[in-house]
């Protein structure tokens, strides 16, 4: 069974693992079948963007070749199933780093393109798609195509953040960023309130990476308190690669383990621990990927899984909207202990359907406690909608079609450019075609 | 020659398109820029793999040798070509082999013969050719991929198992032959289930006994560095096979293994 990272959906799939050398045949066979097809990488999307109920999943991680690499310029072309984890092991010793990286290194390059992922440097570097120079795509109707800003530019822009619907992404050409050390200068700063967060973000504009962890249970004047982190790569030092050692979550924890009390205690410990005021040198692995050290950490949320919610609010509405959301969460008592705030930069994403844009984003997760959690999430959607914001498809599994279509008005362009053989559970849900059989 | 990071080596990989071989070659590219000689049948795949490995740090001088390695008639010619190009060969991985379908091998003599030609006859010839080179140059490390199936004849795959078992005898004998020379090592690696295209058709694949090609490849590297003669990949198979080998015949014959 293939689950997404939130583990809240259990769908039947027909699964084909793409194999180097056989992939052309495998793609052809999948396209000739009657079921809708979708590429699936490492399954780190939380909701249903990488799921395809009763359809075919083409699982990509065995497609992990480097097709070309110029280590003088940092331009690499890689198979879509290659993970950030493996690419980092190759490029860091050569003095290159991912231009943009999300909070886990277990994502494929194809997935990074399809979701147009972002990271702690959005305010400086924009989204992942901004660094993609060329793509190879296999379509059921038009065959093999290459896309770039000059060649098939419309389809290129629709493929960045296109949720894998414009064709099967075969390879990605990417401009890496030079580094002279695998270590960063990191400063963790205590943040006392929401306005403090916006002040710190403004002050830290010149830092390459900024992010804040928020304590969701703080209310009143303390609302928005947390730990603000900023960092930049050191100018010189060792180009050490991350360790591949990790401990593993052995089984799904019982659902009651995460409750208001345990999360409050965690939040308190997290805030008072010495590292919360850490200033100094840190390797990229703990800085960017703190949770990668625990394999299957999603099992912490119990057998029913969990929901993520990440929104982006326009800059002018940001503070007010975030305040409302945090108040609503504190009232619910369903705390999120991985709550993350980040100010995004003005650079527009090259992706037509990209989540990224200027404003402030808040990422939350909630154990699946059934109707009360779904109600909370709908209420959060309503606040986002009232502030002209949008929710990140890669993390969603329940937003309404109306809200999606309103907040991503260009969805009709993606629908028009979609490969007729490709679809996903997410897409059928938000376009109101819920059954795989109604797929055209 | 025991230092694995400093001096770039020349590494010959026989059956370079196999998943374990690719993982082995990729791991060899860490820390040094080895010259790889990638031998196999599928030229296009070999060239893609060469590009991947060079991008990962293998030397630009890495090359591709195209031929049917499993045909005993080809071994001498192909090896002469390889040795002409390379001069010195430091490490060799013999990674090719076929599993096939035992019922076909039982029903058709030609299929049976080809199984033995590929897995044993040609492999023995490659090993001896490589051993002669090692002897002349005074150093070298050979690793051969065997199988846990070679440890005891079992009704389900004794034909395949017998080829791999014989290969193990060959390797252990060759290791004995070079026992006095610490710069020449011979290693037989015996994997269990590996998650590769070769096993994609097996129902119920997956679970704790299935190893990734990367895992098996890292066991091979470690075994070579530690100059081991015989290793299971991963280690759990050592204990499983200890039990399987110890089963008395009457008990064994009651099972369907």
Image (tube, rainbow, N blue to C red):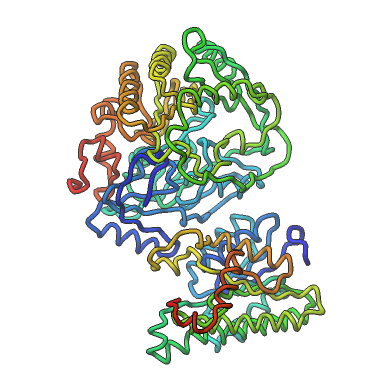
Residue A9 image-quadrant placement: top left
From the viewer's perspective, is B49 left or right of B4?
left
Give the residue displayed 56% in from the left and 79% down from the top: B150
The percent coordinates of residue A139 (x first, y second) are 31, 52
Q: Nearer the viewer, residue A101 or B49?
A: A101
A102 lies above or below B146: above
Q: Quadrant of residue B213?
A: bottom right
Residue A403 versus residue B99 in the image, above or below: above
Residue A421: tell me if it is visible.
Answer: yes
Can you give x and y, in whole percent of width and height, for residue B32 in the image? 70, 57
Q: In the picture shown, does residue A185 fall above or below A112?
A: above
Q: Quadrant of residue B201?
A: bottom left
Lateral position of residue A138 relative to residue A119, left or right: left
- Find the residue positioned furthest to the top: A221
- Identify the residue at image location x=50%, y=71%: B43
> Looking at the image, which residue is at 39% across and 61% down?
A23
Q: Determine whether A95 is above or below A287 in the image.
A: below
**In the image, what residue occupies the spot 51% across and 86% down?**
B116
- Please say whether residue A315 is visible from this viewpoint: no
Relative to the observer, which residue lies in front, A434 or A404? A434
Residue A344 x, y percent position in the rendering: 48, 24
């Amino acid at each position: 069974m293939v689950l997404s990272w939130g583990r809240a959906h259990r769908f039947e799939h027909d699964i084909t693992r793409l194999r180097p050398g056989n992939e052309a045949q495998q793609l052809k066979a999948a396209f000739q079948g009657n079921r809708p097809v979708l590429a699936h990488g490492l399954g780190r999307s939380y909701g249903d963007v990488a799921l395809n109920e009763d359809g075919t999943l083409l699982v990509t991680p065995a497609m992990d070749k480097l097709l070309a690499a110029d280590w003088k310029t940092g331009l690499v072309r890689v198979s879509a199933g290659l993970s950030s984890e493996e690419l980092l092991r190759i490029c860091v010793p050569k003095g290159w780093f991912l231009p943009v990286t999300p909070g886990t290194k277990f994502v494929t390059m194809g997935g990074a393109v399809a979701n147009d992922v972002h990271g702690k440097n959005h305010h400086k570097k924009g989204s992942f798609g901004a660094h993609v120079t060329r793509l190879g795509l296999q379509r059921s109707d038009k065959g093999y195509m290459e896309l770039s800003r000059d060649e098939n530019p419309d389809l290129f822009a629709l493929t960045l953040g296109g949720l894998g619907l414009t064709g099967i992404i075969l390879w990605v050409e990417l401009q890496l960023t030079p580094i002279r050390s695998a270590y960063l200068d990191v400063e963790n700063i205590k943040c006392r309130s929401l306005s403090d967060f916006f002040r710190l973000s403004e002050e830290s504009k010149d830092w390459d990476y900024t992010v804040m962890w928020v304590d969701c249970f703080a209310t009143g004047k303390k609302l928005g308190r947390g730990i603000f982190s900023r960092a930049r790569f050191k100018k010189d030092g060792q180009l050490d690669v991350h360790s591949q050692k990790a401990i593993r979550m052995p089984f799904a924890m019982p659902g009651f383990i995460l409750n208001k009390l345990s999360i409050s205690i965690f939040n308190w410990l997290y805030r008072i621990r010495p590292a919360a005021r850490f200033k100094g040198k840190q390797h990229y692995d703990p800085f960017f990927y703190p949770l990668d050290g625990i394999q299957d950490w999603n099992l912490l949320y119990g057998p029913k899984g969990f929901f993520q919610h990440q929104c982006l609010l326009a800059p002018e509405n940001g503070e007010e909207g975030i305040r409302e959301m945090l108040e609503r969460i504190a009232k619910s008592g369903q705390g999120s202990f991985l709550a993350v705030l980040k100010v995004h930069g003005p650079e527009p994403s090259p992706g037509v359907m990209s989540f990224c844009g200027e404003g402030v984003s808040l990422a939350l997760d909630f154990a699946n406690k059934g109707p009360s959690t779904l109600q909370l999430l709908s209420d959060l959607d309503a606040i986002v909608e009232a502030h002209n914001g949008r929710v990140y498809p890669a993390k969603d599994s329940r937003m309404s079609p109306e809200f999606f279509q309103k907040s991503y008005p260009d969805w009709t362009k993606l629908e028009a450019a979609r490969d007729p053989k490709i679809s996903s559970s997410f897409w059928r849900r938000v376009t109101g075609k819920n059954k795989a059989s109604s797929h055209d | 020659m025991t230092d694995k990071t400093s001096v770039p080596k020349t590494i010959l990989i026989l059956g370079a398109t196999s998943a374990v071989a690719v993982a082995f070659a990729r791991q060899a590219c860490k820390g040094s820029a080895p010259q790889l000689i990638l031998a196999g049948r599928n030229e296009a795949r070999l060239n893609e793999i060469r590009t991947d490995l060079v991008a990962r740090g293998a030397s630009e001088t890495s090359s591709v040798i195209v031929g049917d390695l499993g045909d005993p008639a080809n071994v001498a010619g192909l090896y002469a070509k390889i040795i002409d190009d390379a001069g010195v060969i430091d490490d060799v991985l013999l990674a090719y082999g076929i599993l096939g379908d035992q019922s076909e091998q039982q029903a058709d003599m030609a299929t049976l013969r080809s199984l033995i030609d590929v897995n044993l006859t040609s492999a023995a010839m490659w090993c001896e050719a490589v051993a002669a080179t090692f002897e002349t140059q005074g150093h070298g490390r050979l690793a051969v991929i065997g199988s846990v199936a070679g440890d005891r004849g079992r009704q389900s795959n004794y034909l395949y198992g017998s080829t791999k078992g014989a290969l193990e005898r060959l390797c252990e004998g060759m290791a004995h032959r070079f026992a006095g020379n610490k710069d020449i090592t011979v290693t037989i690696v015996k994997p269990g289930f590996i998650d590769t295209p070769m096993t994609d058709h097996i129902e119920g694949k997956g679970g704790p006994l299935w190893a990734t090609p990367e895992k098996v490849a890292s066991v091979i590297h470690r075994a070579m560095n530690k100059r081991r003669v015989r290793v299971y990949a991963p280690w759990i198979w050592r204990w499983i096979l200890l039990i399987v080998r110890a089963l008395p015949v009457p008990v064994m014959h009651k099972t369907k293994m």
